[in-house]
Amino acid sequence: QKEVEQDPGPLSVPEGAIVSLNCTYSNSAFQYFMWYRQYSRKGPELLMYTYSSGNKEDGRFTAQVDKSSKYISLFIRDSQPSDSATYLCAMSEDSNYQLIWGAGTKLIIKP
Amino acid sequence: GAGVSQSPRYKVAKRGQDVALRCDPISGHVSLFWYQQALGQGPEFLTYFQNEAQLDKSGLPSDRFFAERPEGSVSTLKIQRTQQEDSAVYLCASSLAGTSAQTQYFGPGTRLLVL
């Protein structure tokens, strides 16, 4: 079993819908949680960064961490076709570069 | 300003060939990272440089993989005697300073296909 599990999708939703993307993990020592967006033929781009438990909001994006359930989520409100991409979660025990990545969920927003 | 650039963007190699992949980090960025991303997977860490010093190469999968950054700017990842399992996207990332993952900027990657 992988340390970080993420449904590969694809997840297809109509424009304007609320999108929920999720990852589960097994290592209770993880404290730093990140969400990246990766467009086709591009490198990952950091979207959200959260330390420990709780919520963080940035525009249309909200990241949630539930350490008791070892479950993290990314919500996208008012989804747009330009949000179509692969979304990867990543996490680590401390804030350094040794991240453990999920496999990514492919998201398709239909106009 | 310019981001991280990588070349070539695509490389097809015959099994057994040597390949060299180049990364041009953002100007002034001290830290440089290489990752390997297999199809349908997240990136996996390969190696980390601070200026010209290779401080961590724990992720390099075998001694066929070698990375250098001789002048503390451009970096080259070399793979000798390529194997089919080396087929992946090789991502480079740079950071102004330090090792925090959240400060890294990724390049577009080099897609390597070994036949």
Image (spheres, coloured by chain):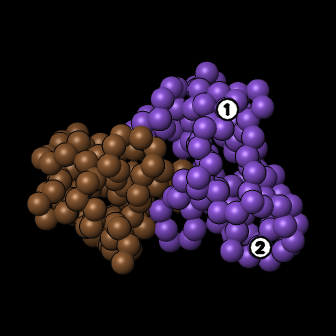
Q: Residues within 10 Å of mark 1 (few under 14, many from 20)?
A: some
Compared with A49, B63 (above or below) is below
Residue B26 seen in the current view: no
Q: Residue at x 23, y 42 (%)?
A: A51
Numbered label attached to residue A40: none
Place residue A103 in its image quadrant: bottom left
The one nearer the camera, A7 or A16, is A7
In this view, the mark in front (2 or 1): 1
Numbered label attached to residue B53: 1
Do discs 2 and 1 belong to a common subunit? Answer: yes
Q: Residue at x 56, y 71 (%)?
A: B39
Query: Residue under mark 2: which chain is it in?
Result: B
As measured in the structure, the alpha-carbon distance from the residue carrying label 2 to the one carrying label 1 is 28 Å
User: Tell me, what hue is chain A?
Assistant: brown
The one nearer the camera, A52 or A21, is A52
Upstream in sequence: badge 2 or badge 1: 1
In the image, which lettered chain appears purple?
A: B
The residue indicated by pointer 2 is: B83
The N terminus of chain B lies in quadrant: top right
SS class, disc 1: strand
Q: Position of residue B115 (x, y in %)?
A: 80, 77
The one nearer the camera, A36 or B20, is B20
Q: Left or right: where does residue A1 sit relative to residue B109? A: left
SS class, disc 2: loop
Q: Residue at x 48, y 29 (%)?
A: B98
Q: Left or right: where does residue B111 sit relative to residue A63? A: right
Q: Left or right: where does residue B110 sit relative to residue B44? A: right
Q: Left or right: where does residue A79 sit relative to residue B72? A: left
Q: Residues within 10 Å of mark 2 (few under 14, many from 20)?
A: some
Instruction: Name the kind of residue labelled 2 in the image.
Output: Gln
Instruction: Name the kind of residue labelled 1 in the image.
Output: Ala
